[in-house]
Image (cartoon, rainbow, N blue to C red):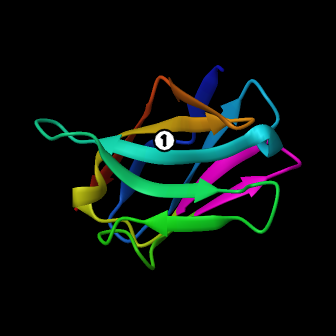
Amino acid sequence: IQLVESGGGLVQAGGSLTLSCAPSVSIFSIDAMGWYRQAPGKQRELVAGITGISGSGSTNYADSVKGRFTISGDNVKNTIDLQMNSLKPEDTAVYYCNIRNYLGVEVDDWGQGTQVTVSS
């Protein structure tokens, strides 16, 4: 499965960005996916995850982004979006989307990443 991220950029602290992940398959065939990020010199970490997109769905977030970030599916654009509000300089990283389960089969597909830079 191919994934293409978009929406990254430079924003001032307190600002907002929306990242989009466009898979090469219908988002309703994806059972589990997540947004990750990796800052320079740090390990890649899970930022937000979503399961059951075709149904009621459930989400989970890293403590550092709870209340600020929202992950959701857009069935019109066929994307999984990450709405990021109240951005902080420590949110600066390359953001990646990842699919973990497709049609009930475990996979591990990654996008190329999109850079988010938050200036203070």
x and y percent of residue 80 in the render?
Answer: 67, 47
Considering depth in this image, is 86 or 59 the residue closer to the camera? Answer: 59
**In the image, is 42 to the left or to the right of 21?**
left
- Secondary structure predominantly adopted by residues drawn in magenta: strand
Going by the numbered disc 1, the residue's amino acid type is: Gly
Q: Is residue 32 visible?
A: yes
Count of number-bearing discs: 1
Residue placed furthest toward the left:
41
Instruction: Let me know if residue 65 is in the magenta part.
Output: no
Residue under the image location 24 percent in, 59 percent down: 89
Quadrant housing the N terminus: top right
Residue 27: quarter of image: top right
Residue under the image location 74 percent in, 24 percent down: 24
**In the image, is 28 to the left or to the right of 12?**
right
**Dot 1 crowding, Cα within 10 Å, few <14, some 14–19, many 20+:** some
Residue under the image location 51 percent in, 56 percent down: 49
Residue placed furthest toward the bottom:
67
**In the image, is 84 to the left or to the right of 90?**
right
Mark 1, secondary structure of its residue: loop
The residue where tag 1 is placed is: 8
Considering depth in this image, is 42 or 117 the residue closer to the camera? Answer: 42
Considering depth in this image, is 64 or 93 the residue closer to the camera? Answer: 64
Q: Is residue 110 visible?
A: no
x and y percent of residue 104 in the render?
Answer: 70, 38
x and y percent of residue 2 in the render?
Answer: 64, 20
Residue under the image location 49 percent in, 66 percent down: 60
Q: Which residues are magenta?
A: 71-83
Quadrant housing the C terminus: bottom left
Instruction: Let me know if residue 77 is in the magenta part.
Output: yes
From this view, report whether residue 56 is shown above or below residue 48: below
Residue 71: quarter of image: bottom right
